[in-house]
């Protein structure tokens, strides 16, 4: 497990950077059937489970799901991965981008009437959606039937680097947009799906074609995704991509298990062309005091066995990754473990400002949980009275102002607070103090976040509302967002904006 004592001490040191001011204050996040939005902000529903992604998607029929139909619709689950901005502005001057959203899971109890699993439909509901977004009349919206809109799922043909092909992407849990203009999708543990979907296809039952990092061009709806063998095959939680000082590709990856590893891949050559991730060196992180050192792993060695043999440090369910776009700073959200059940967020600053360096400084940003408890730690200032606090941080995004956006996920457990989206400064007096910007409806959790290029809208996912223990399709914990009899609750792609304009969060 992490060297918690050292990181706690290091986490109290303020960074030498100008103070920032969040336009957010203390906010309670009560558990209720509706959601909670911070004062001065607005939440818009942009996409829901069953809404059409491709132009030819049929109408949503949740009680009689057809696999071919749902394969063209927004999936049951929703986790925002990143936003890809074209290098050249459009001729008409309209700001546009491609938003990537993963659909990691499908809960049969909540997705199908009677709770009876429908494997073919579940296979089609999972995967990812690529969505055209643009700014219209002062608001960012999803373009209905946009020509670059695309659904990736179990029928998507993929190439495997080094030779071969495989049908389908499976259980995408994380992803990111790379500095070299591609999209990375991180497949999770294929074992979760093998038994469930194995009867549909022997290749799924075998599972050898899944558990990879998948790369594709988000701007070309005809591009063939490539499963990158050099990045190894294991149960990914998330990925983040950067460039080393000498121009090589750097990909950080989490091994999302209760005692999982943090890994890094550095390409052998420059991050240019479509084969940049075909060759390179894989490293595992080892924490030693307030330092992180990258230990190289033997080429082709299986994970996680090779990471353990090399003496890699195990983390408390390493989950989300967020890179600071203004500098070589990586945030790691650890969901928690039996020893530290509430989780924490760690900040890593690469040596010499180079993501390809041999090590990094490591310090705690905050330790989550009840601030009255012995393990919680929220900067120097502490949480303001009356504010909700995060538990089980699962996703993290860093914006261009040096601010982290953290989403929590307690796996549907109902507690004293709703799941939340929190903003946290990385410098100044508010460093390490997460303030709530949004509270999810009952049974839901937060599924990632991504800022628009102008910083005025935060896209984020609201996962599986109503899916609390014991709930079902016909008896959910809430019927958000429609609140209509007979209509099941729906995961949502949402947008958070500041009323009156300006950067979200203040």
Image (cartoon, grey):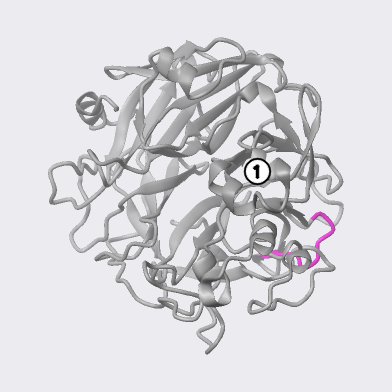
**x then y, percent, for residue 361:** 36, 20
Region rendered in magenta: 141-148
Residue with the mark numbered 1: 205
Which is nearer the eye, 156 or 141? 156
* Disc 1, SS: helix
Residues packed near mark 1 inside 10 Å, few (<14), some (14 to 19) or many (20 plus):
some
Camera sees residue 449: yes
Query: Where's the C terminus, which quadrant?
Result: bottom left
Going 83% across and 51% down the picture, which residue do you hit? 90
**x then y, percent, for residue 164:** 81, 29
**Residue 211 drawn above or below residue 394:** above
From the viewer's perspective, tell me whether residue 170 is left or right of residue 53. left
**x then y, percent, for residue 350:** 45, 20
Q: State which quadrant residue 290 falls in.
A: top left
**x then y, percent, for residue 464:** 49, 65
Going 56% across and 83% down the picture, which residue do you hit? 487
Query: Where's the N terminus, which quadrant?
Result: top left
Magenta residues: mostly which secondary structure? loop
Q: State which quadrant residue 112 falls in.
A: bottom right
From the viewer's perspective, tell me whether residue 192 is left or right of residue 262. right
Camera sees residue 182: no
Q: State which quadrant residue 214 falls in.
A: top right
**Residue 200 drawn above or below residue 187:** below
Is residue 92 shown in magenta?
Answer: no
Going 43% across and 44% down the picture, which residue do you hit? 403
């Amino acid at each position: 497990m992490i060297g918690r004592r050292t990181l706690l001490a290091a986490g109290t040191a303020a960074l030498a950077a100008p103070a920032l001011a969040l336009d957010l204050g203390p906010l309670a996040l009560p558990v209720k059937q509706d959601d909670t939005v911070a004062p001065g902000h607005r939440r818009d529903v942009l996409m829901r489970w069953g809404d059409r992604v491709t132009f030819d998607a049929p109408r949503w029929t949740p009680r009689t799901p057809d696999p071919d139909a749902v394969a063209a619709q927004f999936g049951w689950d929703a986790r925002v991965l990143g936003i890809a901005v074209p290098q050249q502005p459009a001729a008409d001057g309209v700001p546009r981008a491609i938003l990537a959203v993963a659909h990691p899971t499908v809960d049969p109890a909540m997705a199908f009437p009677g709770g009876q699993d429908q494997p073919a439909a579940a296979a089609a509901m999972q995967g990812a959606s690529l969505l055209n977004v643009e700014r219209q009349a002062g608001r960012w919206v999803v373009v209905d039937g946009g020509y670059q809109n695309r659904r990736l799922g179990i029928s998507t043909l993929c190439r495997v680097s080094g030779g071969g092909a495989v049908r389908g992407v499976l259980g995408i849990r994380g992803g990111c947009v790379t500095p070299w203009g591609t999209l990375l999708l991180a497949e999770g543990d294929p074992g979760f799906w093998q038994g469930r979907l194995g009867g549909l296809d022997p290749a799924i039952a075998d599972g050898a074609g899944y558990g990879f990092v998948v790369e594709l061009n988000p701007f070309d709806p005809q591009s063939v995704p490539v499963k990158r063998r050099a990045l190894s095959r294991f149960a990914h939680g998330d990925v983040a991509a950067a460039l080393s000082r000498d121009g090589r590709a750097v990909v950080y990856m989490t091994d999302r298990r209760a005692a999982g590893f943090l890994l890094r891949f550095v390409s052998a050559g420059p991050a240019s062309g479509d084969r940049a991730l075909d060759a390179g060196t894989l490293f595992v992180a080892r924490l030693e005091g307030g330092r992180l050192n990258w230990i190289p792993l033997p080429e082709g060695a299986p994970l996680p066995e090779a990471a353990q043999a090399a003496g890699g440090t195990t983390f408390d369910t390493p989950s989300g990754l967020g890179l600071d776009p203004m500098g070589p700073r990586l945030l790691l959200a650890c969901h928690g473990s039996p020893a530290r059940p509430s989780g924490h967020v760690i900040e890593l600053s690469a040596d010499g400002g180079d993501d390809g360096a041999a090590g990094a400084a490591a310090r705690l940003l905050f330790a989550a949980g009840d601030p009255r408890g012995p393990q919680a730690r929220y900067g120097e200032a502490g949480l303001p009275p009356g504010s909700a606090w995060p538990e089980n941080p699962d996703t993290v995004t860093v914006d261009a102002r040096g601010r982290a956006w953290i989403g929590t996920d307690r796996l549907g457990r109902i507690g004293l607070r709703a799941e939340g989206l929190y903003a946290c400064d990385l410098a100044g007096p508010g460093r390490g103090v997460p303030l709530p910007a949004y509270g999810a409806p009952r049974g839901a959790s937060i599924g990632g976040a991504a800022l628009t290029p102008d910083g005025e809208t935060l896209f984020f996912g609201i996962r599986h509302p109503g899916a609390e223990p014991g709930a079902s399709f016909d008896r959910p914990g809430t019927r958000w967002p429609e609140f209509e009899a007979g209509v099941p609750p729906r995961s949502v792609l949402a947008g958070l904006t500041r009323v009156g304009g300006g950067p979200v969060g203040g």
